[in-house]
Image (tube, rainbow, N blue to C red):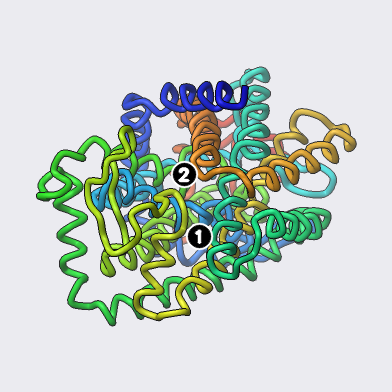
Amino acid sequence: MVVAIEEIIHNIHKLMWSNTFIFICLATGLYFSLRTRFLQVRHLGRMIKYLFVGTGSKSGISSFQSFAMGLAGRVGTGNIAGVGAAIAFGGPGAIFWMWAIAFLGAGSAFVESTLGQIYKTQGNGEYVGGPAFYISKGTGQKWFGVLFALVTAVALGICLPGVQSYSMTSALELAFDVPKWIAGIIIVGAMSLVIVGGIKRLASVAEAVVPLMAGLYILFAMIIMIIKVDQVPEVFRLILSSAFGKDQFFGGMLGSAIMWGVKRGIYSNEAGQGTGAHAAAAAEVDHPAKQGLVQAFSVYVDTLFVCSATAFMILSTNCYNVIDHATGAVIYQGSIPEATEGGSAAFTQFAVDSVFSGLGTPFVAVALSCFAFTALLSHYYMAETNVKFLTKNKFARYGFALLFLAATFYGSVRSADLAWTLGDIGVAAMAYLNIVAMYLLQRPAIAALKDFERQLKAGAQKFNFNPRRCGIKGADFWEKKS
């Protein structure tokens, strides 16, 4: 029975992660980059500036807290274990395609996050929003918003927790010999303490943990790169040549490099899924486009910084292997045991340990645990937001919280393959729906960008947003404010 269910899950995964879906994700990122005239380049300086402008309020969190919340969801298992999986099944060239989807995805992240701000609402004294809200208000199709909310609650509440918790328990078991089931109980207990504090406590934890851990992780990677400086040019050459099928070992893996690079890139940076829009909507800002820019920058931090740090550690130390995902045949065997799981954090742990003997494994375990834990908290907040969209019944929300914690514990002791497969299905389902919504609602997002740039050109120090002036309907919060 269990085998049959797992086979059905794998078949659903193959159907959803087709070549067509990969093309749609790349094309969507390119389309919105063109529509916004590559704002990810033009407004790069302002992306960073607006991180630190503005403070929170009784109803909303600050821009930086929103950035940390969004980054908490993006910077998780995908940055360590996900990069290992991309290299294991797509070869080193997969990293280039992770970069490509991150650069293009910044355009998509701006659109969805700006929409999250435009159509946010205020409930129980807090700002809430996300795709379910902007779909319902922007398109007028309540059923579409309900569908997204249901899919997201299932994806973030049931499918994705196992990816984060399994990676944590696997890393802790390898580093400290902690049994998975014990680590799972500890994770669930710690999550419970934070969850009961609501969005303010979640934001405070993310604000404290994510920037510090990401900074330390990147610093550690830079130290290894300095030690292995002679390998840096070779790593760049390997990534670029493999990305286009020109490398002697990985020449036949062009399709796999693109698929796994895009797949793990989307899973890691979440651009196009709609998750970042939830965090964006909770922020206190004077113009929606500002938070759109902040969330676009979080895609850069996630993939171009943290994921790249992982990739360079793995490739410069030759601590990886590459296998054919379909047949299991080994294509390339690096300086690690042949049976090492590509979907785990082991590549990174072996890489760091090869330079700092005895230190690498526990460091990566701690880093991964911090990243994955804050990702779990972020995913819970986003899932709960969609449950709130569906029902006002507080007992239903309590029941969902228990279901989320149960899924987290169950995932912590299951196999990596099943955990990643369920996670991929959840990501794809959300992305399919949100991409459709982004195309339908692109005009309000672009109108907000043009309004922001008009005020910017006029030398405005403090911005204001009037949706009527931009021809936007259904933005109730901003209509009342203006």
Q: Please tell me whether mark 1 sits on a helix, a strand or a loop.
A: loop
Image quadrant holding the C terminus, namely top right
For mark 2, does the 10 Å Cα neighbourhood hold few (<14), some (14 to 19), or many (20 or more) residues? many
Image quadrant holding the N terminus, namely top right
Three-letter amino acid code at disc 1?
A: Ala
Q: Position of residue 73 (x, y in %)?
A: 57, 52
Q: Is residue 172 left or right of residue 231?
A: right
Report which quarter residue 113 is drawn in.
top right
Q: Is residue 65 left or right of residue 49?
A: right
Q: Earlier in the sequence, mark 2 or mark 1?
A: 2
In this view, 36 is above or below 43: above
Q: Are marks 2 and 1 in contact (CB under 8 Å)?
A: no
Q: Residue at x 33, y 37 (%)?
A: 325
In the image, 330 versus 190, the foreground residue is 330
Checking the image for residue 267, the label placed there is 2
Q: Residue at x 69, y 41 (%)?
A: 407
Q: Please tell me whether mark 2 sits on a helix, a strand or a loop.
A: helix
How many marks the image carries: the answer is 2
In the image, 269 versus 453, the foreground residue is 269
Q: Is residue 210 left or right of residue 221?
A: right
Three-letter amino acid code at disc 2?
A: Tyr
In the image, 239 versus 166, the foreground residue is 166
Residue labelled with disc 1: 460
In this view, 337 is above or below 134: below
Question: What's the distance in space between the residues labelled 2 and 1, CA to CA?
Answer: 37 Å
Q: Residue at x 44, y 49 (%)?
A: 343
Q: Is label 2 or label 1 in front?
A: 2
Q: Is residue 20 left or right of residue 113?
A: left
Q: Residue at x 42, y 71 (%)?
A: 218
In the image, 208 versus 351, the foreground residue is 351
